[in-house]
Structure formats: C-alpha cells, structure tokens
Image: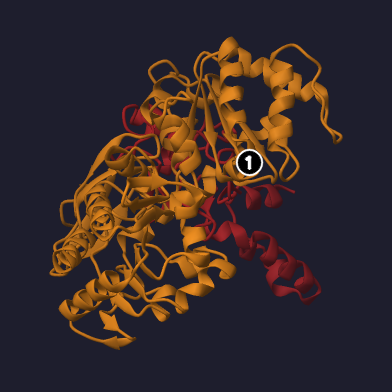
Amino acid sequence: MAFAVALLSRTKQYTECPPLMEEDKYIDSRQKLEIILKPMEGAEETGLIIHEELCSGCGNCVVACPVNVANDPYGSGRGFGPTNEKVIFRVENGKVKAANVKECRRFGKDRILCRACIDPCPTEAIEFV
Amino acid sequence: MTEPITWTCTGCALLCEDIQVYIKDNRVEKVEHACLKGKARVYGCKHTAMSTVDQEEVDVNNAISQAAEILEKAKNPLLYGWSNSTSEAQVAGIELAQTLGACIDSTSSFCQGITINEIINGNVPSCTLEDVREKADVVVYWGADPMSSHPRHLSKYSYFPRGELRQRGYEEDRTAICIDVTQSRTAKISKGMFFSILPGGDAEFMRALMDGLAGRVPKLSYDFDVKRILELAAVLKKAEFGVIFAGLGLVYSIKEEFDLISEFMNTLNRFSNFFLIPMAGHFNMRGFNHNLHEETGYIHRVGFTKNGPVSSVEYSVVEQLKHGADAVMVVGSDPLASLPLSISRRLKDIPLILVDPCSNLTTRVADVTIPCGVSGIEVGGTAIRLDGKKMDISPLMQVDGLSDEMIVRRIMEEVS
C-alpha cells in the first residue's frame, strides 16, 4: 500500500518494484499499470498536464488563475496577455504554456486542490494527475 | 530573440490589441497572447492567390485592366465581400460602386447587419466591450458561442477579467447565462445558467421571458420548467449592468419578426439596465455597415440608381446572385465556400473577379483573380470592432504587392 501511495504521489516509479518487473506472473499487472500511468508522463511537478491538441488559446485559464492575477493584476487580472514573467499560464502560438509551476497552489506543503484553471477550460485541455 | 511588435489582431471582430509578435527576416517567429484563430491569421495564407485571367497567370496590371473592362461592360455589376478589408478599402469600394452605378453588399447581408442596423438607428441600446469589462455583472450569450467564434471574448472582456466595478471577476461579481439550442463550449462555462431551447424557438422563449419579467406566468408550447424562466427573469431584473451578446443563432431564428428584439430590450430596461452587442464575425464586418451608412444612410444591400442610392432586399447579394447581377467583383470573401450552392452556382455563369490574398474555392472559378496584401498583416488602416469602436490596424511587415484599396482605386481610374 505504501508503494502504491508513493506511486500516485510520483515519489516512486512502478519500474522500481522488483517483483513487478522480474516475475512473469505480474506481466498483466505491469501492462495495466503502464496504461494507467501513461498520462502522468508529461505532467509537471504539480501534476499539471496541458493537452495542447485540445487547447484553443482562449486564455480563460490565464485570467482565472489566482497566481496569475496576484502576480500580474493589471495584465492577466484585467484580461490582457501577461505583462511579466511571474505568471504560471501564458498563451504562445495559440496554445497555453505553463511556467513557474512551483507557484501553483497545488504545490508545496500547504497545497490546496485548486481548480481555477480546470473549470474555465471549455475544451478540457488542462488536467491534474 | 528579437523585440516583439505590439499588434492588433484581425483574426476576428474582437480586434485584440495586446498581441505580441516576434518577427525575424520579415517572417513571423512567434506570437504571444493570440488565440488559435489569431495565430492562423498572423501566419497568413496557406496558398497565396496568383494574378490570373481565365485561370492563366498574367501580370497584375493586365488582371486589373481586365477587371475594369468586365465591370465597365456590365449593365448590373455587384461588388460584394468587404468584411475582411480595412475601412479605407471599403470606402474605395463604395466610391467604385457609385461610379459604376452598381450594387454593393457585404457578408453582413446574411449575418449581423439587421442587428447593427437597429443599433446604428438608435432602436436598441449598445455599449463598448470596455464598459462590459469594467461594469457588467450579468452577461447573456443568446444563440452565440464565443468560446468557439471569438475565443478571447470571455477572458478579455465579458466574464473572467476583473473590472473597475467587478473586482472579484467571474468568481463572485459576474453571472454568465447561455441560451442556445445546443450545449456549446460557452454553455459549459455558464454551467447552471444554460437554457436549452428548441431550434427556431427563440421568439417563443423571448416572449415567455417577457411574461416572466412582467410577473405573468410564462407559457411555452413545449415542456420547459417554468420556474427556471422565472429564476432567469429574476436574475435579469437584478442586474446593475447587463449585456446581451446576440449571436447568429438568435438573428437567424427571429429575423422575420426582428422588432421583437427592441420590444424585449424595452421590456428588460423597464426593470433593469441592459445593452445589446452583436457578435459580428469577420474583423471589419461592422466597419462596412458604418462606412456605407455614412455615405448613403443605409448599412447594406445598396443599389446606386439614377435616383441615388436605394436599399432593399432586391439589392442583396442573395437576390443579385440568383437573378440580378451580370458581373460580380468579390473582395476578401469566398462565396463558393460560404454561400449555399443553390445561390453561388450562378457565379460560374457570369464574369467573376476575385480580389483576395489567398487561394480559395472561389479562385477556381474566377475569370480574373487579383492578389492583394492581407489586411492587418501586410496592409494597415482602420477597422470597427464588433461593439462599434474604431481601431487602428498597423501592418506587421512590408511587402511589395498591392493592397485591396489600391487595387479598387486602380480599377476606378480605369473605368472613369
């Protein structure tokens, strides 16, 4: 169970489990895990994944993200493109990009389950794993 | 990395003025803050149009002379398109139509023209998008899906940003309402305030809502929870600054009884403070209506007759293409792709001139094609945003070709 929790919090990889990798009787389980954990491969440290192929560059997340608003109140907070480098979300070439992910409210000791960027996305291009 | 240029996007009628474009060696390297539509606009045509006569490549001067000859010979020419041109090109087009005694019409003829007419003539109150950002607390998307048609609409103006009187933005200070026949992307944002109506049922729903506003029990011919209409009426009544964004879904549905819009706005404004903004699509569609109105007093469907300019359905692009025009000049539009085949079919039977930067379906049947610079990228000028605000458009890069305005003026020189 402890290993499963570590796996979900991404402090361990499934490849670090010797029986799973070495014993034939776990082959099916290993293949299932590969499929289940595949989406987590591109995730940022906060678990953030941006599905660029779904993004329309509308910028809802740029304006809704509380960190963007706090760090750039007269740019992102007012609906314009970000005016400094302290923001998490910005739109480049029609797709949203993430930076400064350690600023995200889902990161660190006092993390919270913020959904401010997920809920306004009309195409479900943002998810956390 | 080179220094960015601040650019006004001509991808749609929102005309976002905060776009940053990085250019190197006269090529776009990167664009920031623009949505996918804006990005596609910045990177220009996939296939640029060639200068042709009878589908054979010719010198652009020959193509212009041929176009002038066609228009001069025609008894009833039609000049159509214009919504993707700067206001300067539109004014030149209106002058050419006057010189030729031609009909002139734009894509607004079957789009938001009818709504813009009501606003220009003062029958319906309207406001600017800046007013919406600073003041609006209730926004209604009726028959409109800006999340698909104008991707930055909600993030830049109507729902998400913090405004002067709406410091808490969408979280507490704004309510988004969507009335539509389908659960669109915008409906998804509106969540519990999405009202699903039947196709063509906008007028009925509007009357039911007016009943709700007046304190009467709303009646609908189909099964709809009346309590929800009363709840909606209560939200609208409480609005301090409300805006209705009228989409094509609404306009197409009630165009036969369009007076209902002003009746609805009057009813609403007996209790509240509401404005209406048309969701124009092309970047300068509204500009054409304003420019033509300034010259003739009409917003579209104008024929320059011996008795002066006249506007009626008879002069609309649809009627003219069916059985009126004997030659057509299209500027910045692709009628074969955008109009029903039953109407556009006749384009292959009459002389057709196309002025456009890109190769499209219409170029395949055009007798004369004249390539022009892309407005907002290679050609500057002014345009009118969907809310009626005049905006300056600076070109992003220098090119050797002609602008659509220059082409129209060259044709005018040859015919006069």
Quadrant housing residue A24: bottom right
B364 versus B170 height, above or below = below
Q: Is residue B110 left or right of residue B388?
A: right
Say which of B209 and B407 sits in front: B407
Near-viewer residue (B378 or B324): B324
Q: Position of residue B133 (x, y in %)?
A: 41, 26
Determine the residue positioned at 13% across, 69% down: B400
The three-letter code of the residue at mark 1 reads Glu
Q: Residues within 10 Å of mark 1 (few under 14, many from 20)?
A: few
Colouring rule applied to residues:
by chain
Which chain identifier belongs to the red chain? A
Q: Colour of chain B?
A: orange
Give the labeled residue for mark 1.
B256
**Image quarter of the N terminus of chain B:** bottom left
The local secondary structure at tag 1 comes to helix
B326 left or right, relative to B338: left
Q: Residue B49: where, in percent of width, then height?
A: 31, 75
> In this rendering, is residue B247 above or below B99?
above
Q: Is residue A43 left or right of residue B332?
A: right
Res. B375 image quadrant: bottom left
Task: Classify the position of the C terminus of chain B by image quarter.
Answer: bottom left
Task: Please state the horizontal and vertical placement of residue B259, each as a whole percent of the image.
Answer: 59, 30
